[in-house]
Image (cartoon, grey):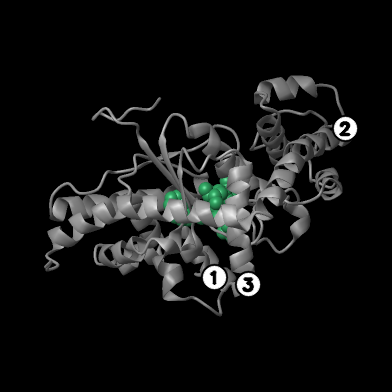
Amino acid sequence: MEIASEGRKKILYSAVQPTNNLTIGNYIGAVNNFAALQNDYDCIYAIANMHAITVRQEPAALRRNTLALLAFYIACGIDPEKCTLYLQSHVSAHAELAWVLNTFTYVGEMERMTQFKDKSAKHADNINMGLMDYPVLMAADILLYQTDVVPVGVDQRQHLEITRDIAARFNNAYSPTFTLPEGLYVKVGAKINDLLDPLKKMSKSSENPNGVVFVNDDRDAIIKKFKRAVTDSGAEIKYDPAAKPGVSNLLSIYSVFTGKSVEECENEFSGCGYGQFKLAVGEAVADKLIPIQTEQARLLADKQYLDDVLKTGAERAAARANKTLAKVYKKIGFYRF
Ligand code: ATP
Ligand code: LTN
């Protein structure tokens, strides 16, 4: 168990955006660990639909993806009784704290954020204020719950650093108000790369879906994508991300999906050809994902249950978030009756 200095369980917070379908990168870097962490931490998991709209979403698809993500979380083993599981837009404190934190954040530092620059290039026709403000809303998410740790993929490291900076700025301007959170990154797979371009992050929104394995791809699609995966020169199956990015990426994926260490995986395939190796990776991924998909589909058929989970989650989350928000409003001088 992870205990904070005051003797309580440490608070852990993470969120995923309900945009498109999740990839195995999202699964490996984030969701797969969420269930494993729920016994050791006081866990809060959100569906970040307010972040999702920083890129244009089709309303029906956003609604569908929201329930799909909720069902996926639960199918992966997140227990809504043990954790606080909720939809971001159900807790108004997120938008409210983000507004306050905006006044402690500089335009220049937001313009320099890597994700803002990447997404601005990708969506040049819609560089909206929300896209630029994305990290401040994320800081509000995290800080509202006095979070100690945030499990995310390494692409989120910069967002975590800015969260700490904003929190420290506020704490220094008034008095200690926010806990400064730490990032928690998986040892294997904190950045899974595209199967066709192993130097690029595997991303939900990639132009070529053949390099991206989605968690709801069927068995054939999964195997086909792995069979086509780009490998490297030389025949050895060795973990060496600089010299062998393709093979190393596949080894990371295999390691996570089988629970074996990377070294064990290397030994298992020593002397094997790439073809046999790629097929084995595809099969391991499909073997793990298919039962999760079945459970997800079963949950999606029970909308009442999912609504109940969201309702309880929203109540629990709001009660916690509003405590922090009330402190903030008091410190900054917002008049109360
Ligand atoms: P997009 O590609 O559309 O920007 P995304 O795939 O990064 O979206 P998010 O909802 O923003 O998806 O991320 C959810 C979680 O998955 C985050 O913790 C993020 O760090 C993690 N993650 C995303 N892609 C990868 C990846 N390729 N490898 C490891 N972790 C990842
Ligand atoms: N930006 C995150 C999603 C996210 C998040 C958060 C993660 C929104 N709010 C709070 C951790 C904590 C991403 O993964 N792209």
Q: Secondary structure at mark 2?
A: helix
- The residue to which callout 2 is attached is 276
In this rendering, is residue 60 above or below 146? below
Residue 61 falls left or right of residue 190:
right
Q: Is mark 3 within 8 Å of ligand 1?
A: no
Q: Residue at x 77, y 29 (%)?
A: 237
Q: Secondary structure at mark 3?
A: helix
Q: Is mark 1 within 8 Å of ligand 1?
A: yes
In this rendering, is residue 107 above or below 270? below
> Which numbered disc covers residue 55?
1
Mark 2 residue crowding within 10 angstroms, few (<14) / some (14–19) / many (20+): few
> Which numbered disc covers residue 60?
3
Q: Residue at x 43, y 40 (%)?
A: 43
> Which numbered disc covers residue 274?
none
Report the amino acid beneath label 2: Gln
In this rendering, is residue 158 above or below 335? above
